[in-house]
Image (cartoon, rainbow, N blue to C red):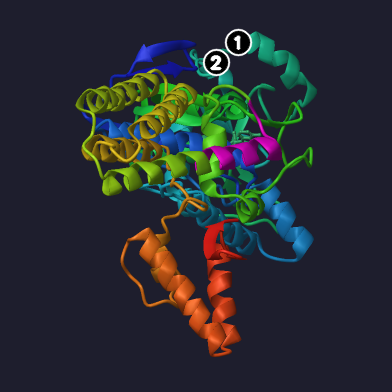
Amino acid sequence: MRIYNSATHKKEEFQPIEPGKVRMYVCGPTVYDNIHIGNARTFISFDVIRRWLIASGYEVTFAQNLTDVDDKIIKRANEQGRTAAEVATEFSDKFIGVMRAANVLDPDVRPRATKEIGPMIAMIKTLIEQGHAYAADNGDVYFAVRSDPNYGQVSGRNIDDLMVGARIEENEDKNDPLDFALWKAAKPGEPSWPSPWGEGRPGWHTECAAMVHRYLGTPIDIHGGGSDLAFPHHENECAQATCAWHQGFSNTWMHTGMLLVDGEKMSKSLGNFFTLAEVLEQHSAAALRLLMLQTSYRSPLDFSWERLEGAENSLTRIAGTVENLRWAANHATADADAAAAEAFAAKVAETRAAFKECMDDDFNTAGAMGAVFGFVTECNQYLEQAGDAADKAAALAAADTLAELLDTFGIELPEPKVELPLGLLGVAAGLVAYTGDDVDEAAAKILEARAEARAAKNWDLADAIRDQLKDLGLTIEDTAAGTRIKSL
Ligand code: AMP
Ligand code: ZN
């Protein structure tokens, strides 16, 4: 497996520190508001990366923090006349709920900044003792960037270039404008904790370094986040951890590209965002994931509602093929052509191999999805050629393969809408006493039940049967030749 390491700008052969195990950390959200689909792109990308590592046989330990104390949370709390803890709890809960709705697996460990103050203070003390940090007169503690000879190793920046930007926000409490806060002295009305430097709260970069060390142990195999976090956040996390513990911090750094709308990064500050919750009210998580995974995680991703609609249609098409494969396998009435079945079975194996090859090449989900789409076309061709003589084993293997490959993407196929076997109707409608799987028989029973209801002037039942059919994408049509059920 090869992974692009954004610190070295190279695809590297992945060698976990402990054979068979992967320790992975992805920075979580600052919980002051609902997350948008830009944030979700990053979390869904790493969810798929994690799922693929697991599918490849690794035992993965995945940690993700919740930043539950921060300037933005305090500001939001003040605006709303609530405490910072109330705001953080509300949006932590919402984040966890909406991640589950998006079919993102829960992390193995989910530390919260406010519960990790002790380990952060311990790390800051270690840094001060080793001359990498200093307490300023105002009660802040700063990390001395120039004390770290490797500063810049994550983001590839060079200290002299950084000076240009840093001078703009010079601060007289710092020894050097590049230094960043590890601990911030409390201001009136802000949440704070006691420390050797007085009441205060941790700086943003402090928590991740302390949590990685505490929950995973340094160095870890993979550290990830959006590309906007590479500098300064990840650079500063790395500087703290490597200076405090001298063990390295992360062997591989992975950064996701930004989700864009009309060419601009989706962000709260630009106001060009859609929350994940609102998108999931209108579209399935499966379609959103499919849309995202059709672009590789490192590239920018253009979001539009049309593309999401397109992903929804692609999913329906794949689901229809899976259903048709199963249907054909179970209803074949003639013997299959052995040579055609063998050729089709070979395509199943080729698709799996192509999918794996793409995913092992830096999680190329776009290529892997391409293999799936190509295979769907081949399945449809096979079904058409085979007619009522499809090979049962090959058709079922193809259906299972499609479902399984999509499952490694966390994509659940929707229930097929139109080509639903009528045999399921008796059960689904719940109104007709039929539980078999013979299509014609089911249709006849349904029509019979409706005719009886009408004859008895039981209009409620007759309407309920029609409505249930409609929900399944089917309609009852009365024609001169008789009544029949057809697709809407
Ligand atoms: P934040 O709560 O701002 O720290 O963001 C949480 C995660 O979402 C971070 O990993 C960010 O890099 C990521 N992120 C923010 N905006 C976008 C975007 N437009 N596209 C992709 N990832 C993003
Ligand atoms: Zn972080």
Crowding near the residue tagged with mark 2, few <14, some 14–19, many ≥20 C-alpha atoms within 10 Å: many
Label 1, on which residue? 158
Q: How many marks?
A: 2
- Taking the image as shown, residue 19 lies to the left or right of residue 88, namely left
Region of the chain picked out in magenta, as a range: 301-315
In depth, the one of 242 and 229 nearer the eye is 229
At 52% from the left and 37% from the top, the residue drawn is: 290
Which secondary structure lies at badge 2?
Answer: loop
In depth, the one of 32 and 198 nearer the eye is 32
At 20% from the left and 27% from the top, the residue drawn is: 338
* Dot 1 amino acid type: Asn
Residue 131 in view of the camera: no
User: Which image quarter: residue 231?
Assistant: top right
CB atoms of marks 1 and 2 within 8 Å: yes
**Magenta includes 309?**
yes
Q: Where does the image place residue 239, in percent across and percent down from the top left?
A: 49, 24
Q: Is residue 138 above or below residue 283?
A: above
Which secondary structure lies at badge 1?
Answer: loop
Q: Is residue 150 above or below residue 291?
A: above
Q: Where does the image place residue 306, in percent across and percent down from the top left?
A: 69, 37
| Label whose residue precedes the other's in the sequence (1 or 2) | 2
Q: Where does the image place residue 272, in percent across and percent down from the top left?
A: 77, 40
Label 2, on which residue? 152
In depth, the one of 184 and 135 nearer the eye is 184
Crowding near the residue tagged with mark 1, few <14, some 14–19, many ≥20 C-alpha atoms within 10 Å: few
Q: Quadrant of the C terminus?
A: bottom right
Q: Is residue 71 above or below residue 297?
A: below
Q: Is residue 191 above or below residue 219?
A: below
